[in-house]
Structure formats: structure tokens, C-alpha cells
Image (tube, grey):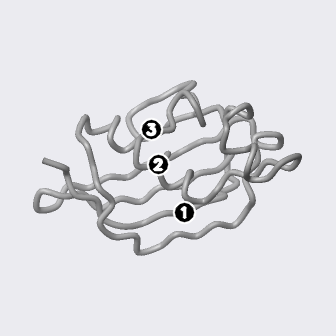
Amino acid sequence: MLENSFYKIKECSENHFTIALLPDCDVYRGHFPGEPISPGVCSIQMVKELMERQIGKSLMLTDIKQARFTTLITPVQHHTLDINLELMPIDGAYTYRATVGQGENIFVELKGTASVVQ
């Protein structure tokens, strides 16, 4: 779980979260010393955790149809991020679309399927 170590939720509404990246996270000591960059896998995990919070259930990402990373995310340049989620239930699972960015600037786009963990 990355919440409260990698990021902290500042605001949330039905389909939108504003989060703050936490630059003192251990991840940044290794990725990369002196020039911290948020690993793509952390962006994916963060989106998964926020989807779980939104629906109140544990999820497993079963399919990532699109993972587009257009900008390096750093806690120095990108103190806060906007995460927009679209979840649609389908046969005991969810299709999802998520964007991570700042305002109109999109840094990550994800689309896929997530199954509820029993």
C-alpha cells in the first residue's frame, strides 16, 4: 500500500482525487538519487488503490489494455496530481479508465479490467 508513504489524499469526490506526492518516500532514494522520478508501476498501484477506495472492495488488475506515460512525474515538479477515474461494473468485474495529471495536462492514461478479490 502506497497511501501515506508515497502519496497522501488531499481531496476526493466521486470520480476525482487530488493527491500530494511525498518526496521523502523511500522509493525516491533509489529511483533516482538526487533526481527523484515516480516509477510507472507506482502510478498504476496508486490508481488501483484509489479505485478500491472508490468502490470499497479489493481489486486485482486483470488486464491493462493501455498504459500510456507521456511525462516523467517527479515530486519536485509535481507536488500535487489530479487523478480521474471511470469505473463501470461488468459481470463481477470493472472496466476502468484513469488519468493522472495536473489540470488539463495528462501524464498517465490507463485503461483495462479489474476483478474483485474475494
Residue that appears at 32% across and 52% down: 87
* x then y, percent, for residue 17: 51, 36
Between the C-alphas of marks 1 and 2, the distance is: 10 Å
Mark 1 vs mark 3, foreground winner is: 3
Mark 1 vs mark 2, foreground winner is: 2
Mark number for residue 92? none
Find disc 1 in the rendering and name its residue: 109
**Amino acid type indicated by mark 1:** Glu
**Would residue 47 appear left or right of 24 to someone viewing this image?**
left
Residue that appears at 56% across and 52% down: 43
Find disc 3 in the rendering and name its residue: 1
Find disc 2 in the rendering and name its residue: 47
Local packing at callout 1 (Cα closer than 10 Å; few below 14, some 14-19, many 20+) is some
Residue that appears at 51% across and 38% down: 2
N-terminal-most mark, 1 or 2? 2
Counting the numbered discs, the total is: 3
Local packing at callout 3 (Cα closer than 10 Å; few below 14, some 14-19, many 20+) is few
Look at the numbered disc 3 and give the secondary structure of its residue: loop
Residue extending farthest to the bottom is: 65
Between the C-alphas of marks 1 and 3, the distance is: 21 Å
Which of the two residues, 93 or 31, is positioned nearer the viewer here? 31
